Image (spheres, helix red, strand yellow):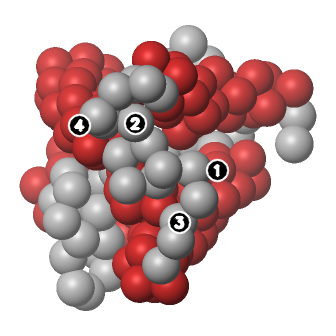
Amino acid sequence: MNMPMLKAVLILPGTALVYAPALIIWFTRDTALAASLAPTSIMIWLAGLPFAAAGLVLMFWTVRLFAVKGGGGTPAPWQPIRYFIVLGPYRHVRNPMLIGVILFLIAEAILLRSTPIFLWMAAFAIINTLYFTLSEEPELEKRFGQAYLDYKRNVPRWLPRLTPYTPPPPS
């Protein structure tokens, strides 16, 4: 992994998945909302681990696609990729990387039995929905033109389509 990609991963998912939850745990530690740092039931593990696994798979898969097929750049808005990627999970949903982060936050909330981390996940999803709608998608429309408009019209933002999207051939 190159240094700009490592920096983007440490800053973006690192903040959402590690730094913010750690602060939440620290600030709520002596309250009725304190996290339980040791799941005591196999049911908690069975409930949380599928979300963690699915989230990790999506995050690693999409970061790898960016690294291999993005033509340089990172998932970070300050250093975007050069090439429009419609491969793998991007053929089913427009934001699989963020879905991976959200799934992993759900896992953290379940495994730590933490309502505040669940609320952080909800706030994170809302903030990102606003960011995508108001900033990222208009920027992608400018950068990739009709190809992105066709993609946006055919591929949902959050709920995956069942069949993979195939972009029309270039004219």
Tell me whether the residue at label 2 lies in contact with that at label 1, contact meaning CB atoms closer than 8 angstroms.
Answer: no
Tell us which disc is closer to us: 3 or 1.
3
Could you tell me the amino acid type at mark 2?
A: Ala
Could you tell me the amino acid type at mark 4?
A: Leu
Going from the N terminus, do you reach mark 2 or mark 1 first? 2
Going from the N terminus, do you reach mark 4 or mark 2 first? 2
Could you tell me the amino acid type at mark 1?
A: Val
User: Residue at position x 47%, y 27% from top?
Assistant: 29
* Nearer to us in this view, 78 or 60: 60
Crowding at mark 3 (Cα within 10 Å: few <14, some 14-19, many 20+): some
Left or right: 92, with 19 as reference point: left
Q: Name the residue under label 1.
A: 63
Q: Name the residue under label 3.
A: 39
Crowding at mark 2 (Cα within 10 Å: few <14, some 14-19, many 20+): some
User: Residue at position x 53%, y 39% from top?
Assistant: 17
Task: Tell me residue 52's x, y (percent).
Answer: 52, 66
Give residue 34's mark: 2
State the SS at label 2: loop
Going from the N terminus, do you reach mark 2 or mark 3 first? 2
Tell us which disc is closer to us: 2 or 1.
2
State the SS at label 4: helix
Task: Tell me residue 140's x, y (percent).
Answer: 33, 30
Give residue 119's mark: 4
**How far is disc 1 from disc 4 in space, using C-alphas?**
26 Å
